[in-house]
Image (cartoon, coloured by chain):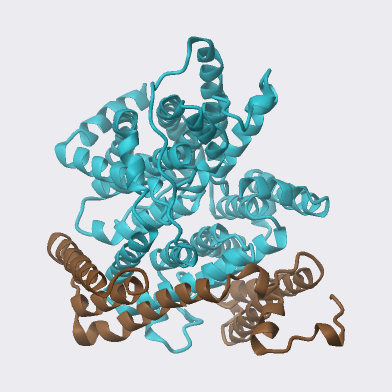
Chain colours: A brown, B cyan
């Protein structure tokens, strides 16, 4: 692990995040996932009278080995190639673009069953087009593309879009 | 003789107007996704699977496999003309292809690439037709122990060859394996890891996982930087000079053999034969200093190899039921969805289907040759569609694709989760292909292992008693040890770095 002096200490939350080891955090998440599955695997029978091996045998070995791999990955993340958040993830502007995609998808998921595809789809596209086009262009493009998609998938391919 | 008769009957199936149309749609979509950065053959295949519900199995697989090999052709055009590879296998083509374009020889680069792709594609399909049936006969001897060991070998190849670190490869592999145990156990019917959620009873859907990992994550990455790509270089003559004919032909022949051979190995991907072919051509060349500055062999070899790989990679799928790449894993999902079991019995139980698909690959390659030689410039213009317009369209089509899996928003949510996971994994250099491959293989492996245990009275002895199984286990151990050794010596990172 790299040593840090008092002068190196991050002053803001954003700076603190940028200094974090992304690999380490991913490894911890993966370890938690493996541990959860390992614990749950004990609820399943290890042996079965019918076939010898029960439904829990394979998952228990699998998740046990996964924990070992998770620990090896965490060790490697700290002692091998370190991926700092500030170095491997983009800046604020680029991350906002990425967050916009995620946000538009969430809006779509929340609205689809209430408003139907054309409105939810248009809103999804509008959120993504607005930063890059004039408002009237963004509105026209969003509605147009949603209508075309609806026509193709609902009418041509019989996809039951709401 | 038997293969020839099968192939002739296959042409009878593939030449019906419906199947010709589906083949044309498949190769056109493949070419399109090959041209467009941000959506690859894996996503496109996953996207179109739900739309094939109402189609006959042979038409569906003809169309979906067309996307697979069509993608290899399309990626070349943008690599040469605008220095932007449409898919991973064409990255290496940028080195000399775009240099040739800058020297006013874009037409020659595209002509050679199209011709090489056609030769590689057709030769490998011919290899598939000749090797497939005897290999399928041999594979009939495989019991659960042999299948388990073979899949384990495939898995070690996946981990060993993909990504720059074996530990990161193992992380991806175990994520895929753990996801595969969610849902109902296929042997005992016990619900596992569903956490009381009815949505998880049938496990996670392969299509939504693949669309999230490969499609959505690519959109996230693309949206980071929306800079427009450059203008395409102008096209000139499509044919090489007389003095270049010999080197070009040799590079094409070597690329064909190399690509086909690598396709047979489970766990490889199309970028590997392209890279190896490039290295081989450079080593064999009398003028290696020309590589990177517009060497024609640097285009002909890799482009032939990645297309030849496609035919070779169909062999493990059709004869053993084992996917060798993420797109092939998606194809396997399509087989299952249409009630087909890929593997040795497919040749005997569904010869019309198998030979129909193989014959369609000859036709599809011919269609692609015609599409590429005269229309390359037109295809390159498609790549100039601004990313700020392209990505939202790809996103909404992906969402519809995920929704159609079970007509439920659950699958859209799953795709979103895997999209975010894929984005993070790309940032910290964890390969994603092993997740999809091991997700597919995991279920099959567990089943084979439990069957082997049952046959051997609750013991694992069957895995080492069978000679075939033992050989596979030894090979798996060699590959795994070799990968660990290469990582310690830091060679693996260098190889993977070149592929990346």
> Taking A139 as reference, is B211 left or right?
right
In the image as oriented, which residue stretches furthest toward the top?
B242
In the image as oriented, which residue stretches furthest toward the left?
A155
**Residue found 18% across the figure and 72% down from its top:** A160
Where is residue B481? Give x, y as percent.
77, 51
> Taking A64 as reference, is B449 left or right?
left
Where is residue B363? Give x, y as percent.
29, 31
Foreground residue among A40 and B368: B368
> Taking B407 as reference, is B181 left or right?
right
Q: Residue B175's image quarter?
A: bottom right
**Residue found 81% across the figure and 51% down from its top:** B485
> From this viewpoint, is residue B474 visible?
no
Where is residue B467? Give x, y as percent.
66, 44
Task: From this view, report whether residue B44 is shown above or below residue B309.
Answer: below
> Taking B16 as reference, is B225 left or right?
right
Where is residue A70? Give x, y as percent.
70, 73
**Residue found 68% across the figure and 83% down from its top:** A15
> From this viewpoint, is residue B294 visible?
yes
Q: Residue B456's image quarter?
A: bottom right
Foreground residue among A71 and A57: A71
């Amino acid at each position: 692990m790299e040593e840090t002096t008092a002068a190196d200490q991050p002053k803001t939350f954003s700076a603190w995040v940028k200094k974090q080891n992304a690999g380490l955090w991913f490894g911890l998440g993966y370890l938690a996932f493996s541990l959860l599955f390992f614990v749950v695997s004990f609820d399943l029978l290890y042996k079965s009278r019918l076939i010898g091996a029960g439904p829990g045998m394979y998952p228990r070995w699998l998740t046990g080995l996964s924990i070992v791999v998770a620990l090896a990955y965490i060790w490697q993340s700290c002692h091998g190639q370190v991926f700092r958040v500030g170095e491997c993830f983009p800046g604020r502007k680029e991350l906002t673009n990425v967050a916009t995609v995620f946000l538009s998808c969430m809006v779509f998921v929340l609205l689809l069953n209430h408003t139907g595809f054309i409105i939810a789809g248009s809103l999804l596209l509008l959120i993504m087009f607005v930063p890059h086009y004039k408002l009237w262009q963004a509105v026209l493009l969003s509605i147009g593309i949603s209508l075309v998609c609806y026509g193709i998938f609902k009418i041509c391919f019989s996809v039951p879009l709401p | 003789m038997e293969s020839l008769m099968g192939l002739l009957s296959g042409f009878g199936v593939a030449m019906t107007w419906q199947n010709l149309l589906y083949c044309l749609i498949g190769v056109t979509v493949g070419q399109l996704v090959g041209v467009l950065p941000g959506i690859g053959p894996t996503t496109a295949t996953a996207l179109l699977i739900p739309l094939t519900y109402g189609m006959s199995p042979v038409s569906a697989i003809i169309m979906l496999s067309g996307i697979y090999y069509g993608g290899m052709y399309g990626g070349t055009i943008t690599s040469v003309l605008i220095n932007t590879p449409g898919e991973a296998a064409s990255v290496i083509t940028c080195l000399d292809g775009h240099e040739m374009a800058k020297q006013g020889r874009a037409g020659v680069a595209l002509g050679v690439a199209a011709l090489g792709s056609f030769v590689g594609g057709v030769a490998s399909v011919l290899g598939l037709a000749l090797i497939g049936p005897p290999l399928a006969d041999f594979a009939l001897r495989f019991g659960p122990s042999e299948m388990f060991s073979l899949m384990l070998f495939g898995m070690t190849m996946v981990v060993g060859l993909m990504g720059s670190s074996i530990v990161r490869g193992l992380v991806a592999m175990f994520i895929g394996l753990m996801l595969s145990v969610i849902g109902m156990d296929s042997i005992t019917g016990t619900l596992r890891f569903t956490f009381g959620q009815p949505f998880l009873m049938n496990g996670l859907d392969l299509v939504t996982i693949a669309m999230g990992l490969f499609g959505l994550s690519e959109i996230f990455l693309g949206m980071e930087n929306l800079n427009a790509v450059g203008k395409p270089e102008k096209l000139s003559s499509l044919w090489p000079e007389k003095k270049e004919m010999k080197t070009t032909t040799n590079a094409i022949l070597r690329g064909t053999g190399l690509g086909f051979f690598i396709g047979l190995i489970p766990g490889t991907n199309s970028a590997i034969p392209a890279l190896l072919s490039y290295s081989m051509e450079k080593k064999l060349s009398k003028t290696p200093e020309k590589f990177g500055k517009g060497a024609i062999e640097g285009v002909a070899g890799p482009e032939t190899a990645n297309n030849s790989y496609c035919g070779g990679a169909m062999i493990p799928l059709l004869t053993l039921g084992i996917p060798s790449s993420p797109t092939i894993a998606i194809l396997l999902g399509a087989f299952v969805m249409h009630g087909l079991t890929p593997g040795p019995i497919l040749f005997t139980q569904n010869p019309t289907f198998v030979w129909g698909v193989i014959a369609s690959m000859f036709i599809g390659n011919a269609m692609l040759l015609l599409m590429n030689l005269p229309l390359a410039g037109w295809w390159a213009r498609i790549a100039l569609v601004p990313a700020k317009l392209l990505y939202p369209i790809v996103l909404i089509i992906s969402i519809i694709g995920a929704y159609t899996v079970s007509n439920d928003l659950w699958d859209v949510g799953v795709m979103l989760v895997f999209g975010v996971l894929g984005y993070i994994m790309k940032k910290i250099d964890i390969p994603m292909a092993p997740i999809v491959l091991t997700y597919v293989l995991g279920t099959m492996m567990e089943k084979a292992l439990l069957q082997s245990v049952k046959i051997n009275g609750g013991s694992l002895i069957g895995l080492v008693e069978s000679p075939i199984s033992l050989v596979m286990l030894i090979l798996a151990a060699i590959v795994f040890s070799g990968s660990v050794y290469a990582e310690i010596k830091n060679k693996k990172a260098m190889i993977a770095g070149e592929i990346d």
